[in-house]
Image (cartoon, grey):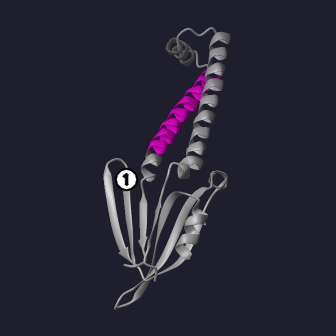
Amino acid sequence: MRDNEIIIQGSFNGIRGELSRRLFFLVIYGIIFLMTNAYKKSFYSDNEITSIFTFLMDQITALNFKSILPILFIFLIFIFLAIFTFSTLFKTIKLFYNINRKVTVNYSKNKISTLSYTFPFFKDVEENKFDNIITVNIRQDFMDRFCNSGKLYIEYLVISKIDSSLACFEIPYVYEPSHALKELLS
């Protein structure tokens, strides 16, 4: 075995693909909001609506539900946009916690140590013994390939006195994962 260790960790360069995807969705949500808001303003001016509450009460008492449907549709779009926007913002903040994940593969001691911080304030330290690294896979989507980042899936063999087993783990948001793959398998 080798007498060295390999340190692989997530980086800001590794999250660029996912971050750009989330920012793209936020821009799309903003465009949909602006279009819906412009439609709402034109609908209000066409129907001479000054107060939405009095307009809805007048339409309900007159049993004119065709005028209520566009307003309900507009408000449903606003509600879904708010939910999607807050969800995307939460996932974006959570994304920054995955940068600090650090995996150390020590070939002289046959140990894999993982240090990670999970949202919001937890620190996880995990140390596993291994006998042989079996496979290392890279998973990339279009934005990850464009930004030269991705996820590494490492599968390793653990042999004990009783039996042997395969174990695996994932290292997300690795910058230049092909370089890390060559280091791990060399």
**Residue at horizontal 45%, vertical 42%?**
93
Q: Is residue 172 above or below residue 61?
A: below
Q: Quadrant of residue 37?
A: top right
In the image, residue 85 lies in the stretch drawn in magenta: yes
Q: Is residue 54 left or right of residue 69?
A: left
Q: Is residue 49 above or below residue 129?
A: above
41 or 109: nearer the viewer: 109
Question: Residue flagged by tag 1: what amino acid is it?
Answer: Thr
Q: Is residue 150 above or below residue 56?
A: below
Residue 115, given in percent of the width and then of the height, sits at 37, 61
**Residue at horizontal 32%, vertical 56%?**
123
5 or 36: nearer the viewer: 5
Residue 83, given in percent of the width and then of the height, sits at 50, 37
Residue 111, given in percent of the width and then of the height, sits at 38, 75
Q: Main secondary structure of the magenta part?
A: helix
Which residue reaches farthest front? 3
Magenta region: 66-93
User: Which quadrant of the figure contains the C terminus?
Assistant: bottom right
Q: Is residue 143 left or right of residue 125?
A: right
Q: Which residue is mark 1?
A: 118
